[in-house]
Amino acid sequence: MATLNESRASEAAAVAAPATASAGGEAVHTPRRTNRARSSSGRRRRWLGLVYLAPALLIYACVVLLPAGQGVNLSFYHWDGITAATWAGVENYTDFFTDPTLRQAVGHTLFFIVFFSFLPVVLGMTSAALTARKDTRGAGVYRWIIFLPQVLTPAVVAVVWKQIYAPDGPLNSVLSAFGLGGLTRGWLGDFTWALPALGLAGTWGAFGLCMVLFAAGAQNIPNELYDAARMDGAGPLREFFTVTLPGLRGQLAVALTLTLLGAIRVFDIVWLTTKGGPGTSTITPSVVLYKRAFSNPDVGAACAIGVVLAVVALIVSLAVVKLSEGDD
Amino acid sequence: MISTREKVFNYAFLTLLAAAVLFPVIWTLGVAVSPEITGSLDLGHMQWSNFTDAWQQAGLTQYLKSSLIITGTAVAISTALAILSGYAFGVLGVVGEKLLFPLMLFGIMIPLEAIVVPLYYDFQSQGLTDTYQGIILAHVGTGVSFGAFWMRAAFRTVPSSIGESAQVDGAGTWTALWRIYLPISRPAIVTFVLLNFMWTWNDYFLSLILVSDPAHQPMTLGLGAFSGRYLVHVNLLAAAAVLISVPVVGLYVFCQRQFIRGMLSGAVKG
């Protein structure tokens, strides 16, 4: 049996990055006992275990497993939710290449990845590097503040940003105050600016988690390493690349997984602010999914989007974990 | 061991970031107590009645009731299931674990989007849409994987010698769970309850799809509806937003460590 510490470490990795657990997880907990009497009691325990698990498993099967299977099946049909479904083959999937709205949504996802993932990770990494040393005081206060958006309801976050970007909102007031009145506009109603505006709101929401994640990791880097780097004449930049960054590899994987999945799935803030508009200028795959499923339904097409999102999510998590394990 | 100049730069950078994060929050708080319905700040004439006005005009009492019923029940059931299944995986072992455990893991990885459409049509055919039972069932079902995981991890940190000695003393698995594993794992359970509460309370997507009847919708949807109808009363909208954030932010203020630690190790849930 694994020792306490080992199992703890593997557990943290498993919970933090699900893909690792699925890949390497289950070598851990099968009690092996040679004594025959004990092994039969062990078997009884494992049947009892199944009994303890049963209620959770039943609900899980009804709410997750069954619909997941149905979703895959439905994605090969055209169905309006009422009349009989007709076979569609892979048409719902080829829509990703041919349907203009869906293609646009995929493009927006790539755009959102910059704001929801790349920027938060860079900002989080920078701020963690700055507070990495144990002699930075007040780091806890900064952490508290910067993490706050994580606990705010997405519905509230949307309301807040909708007002900030409103024609008479504070952003425009600030611009006018600096004599940039010519730049003011209703940001979320603007075909060019709505997408980056939502992106920035996403950066605002995501980077606190990244910072706290990196800061927690940085605390495990021994202070002596920093001091040694400085003794060797490294400046802040060299220090970052030789000490901080390598020490944060695991956290980087987790942060990338979480933020990339956030970017791929973004729904709440878009739906609650622009509903994908103006036109389709902020539409995302999740918004297309919602619309196809419930307004003028094409359920099969909606399910196909769901399946593709799931597959992409899986690939992203696996790829990030692979990369983070990388070359050492 | 670093120069003062570097330190000053560090603090300046962090303060700037913190200010950028706080600005929207503080601005919203300010608007929520300002008299102007256009949403311009006027802290000279704070109008605390905005909160009661917003509460009444948005009909928050009904939404609050729904939120409390949904979140309370879902968290209670989820916690019970998390404990039972975590105990099964972490302590007892499970027949067919090699198959069942990865199957459970799958629930953490699969995004909600991939199941929610078929789920809606299943619920519709069972008469579960627009009911408390339905949305509670959906929350519990989508949270089960994470719960099993979380509590499995917690129970496995309990040294097996403690469990074995209880067994020698004649305690059954049920007694051992109640007398030994639960008390030792209390911090993990508290964190789980906090996270689960936050996720359920803050949910928008699931409720939007499964509950279209305003009588059963939670506060997040109430705010969405209010935001559509009362776009002109920006101060009341801000006040409503503040009111809806109070429970979770309040808990965050008091249990900051559990929130952060919990989300760092478990933020994978969608």
Image (cartoon, rainbow, N blue to C red):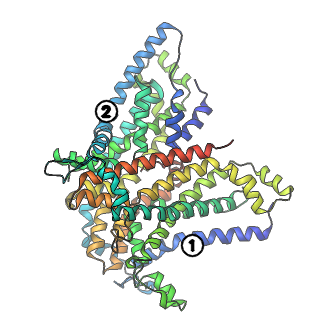
| CA neighbours of label 1 inside 10 A, class few (<14), some (14 to 19), many (20+) | some
Residue type pointed to by label 2: Pro
Q: Chain of mark 1?
A: B
Front residue of B240/A20: it is: A20
Residue in the picture at 26% in, 51% down: A300
- Left of B225 or right of it: where is A205? right
Q: Quadrant where the C terminus of chain A lies? A: top right
Same chain, marks 2 and 1? Answer: no
**Whole-percent x and y of residue B237?**
34, 74
Q: Where is B190 relative to A104, above or below?
A: above
Task: Kindly identify the residue that appears in the image at 51 percent across and 74 percent down.
Answer: B23
The N terminus of chain A is located in which quarter?
top right
The residue indicated by pointer 2 is A55
Which quadrant of the structure image shows residue A162? bottom left
Q: Chain of mark 2?
A: A
The answer to whether residue B203 is seen in the rendering is: no
Q: Amino acid at mark 1?
A: Ala
Q: Position of residue A234 (x, y in %)?
A: 82, 59
Q: SS class of the residue under badge 1?
A: helix
Taking the spot 71% from the left edge, 61% from the top edge, the residue there is A136
Q: Name the residue at 48% across, 57% down.
A: B252
Q: Position of residue B16 (x, y in %)?
A: 61, 72
**Residue named by callout 1:** B19
Q: Is residue B38 left or right of residue A147?
A: left
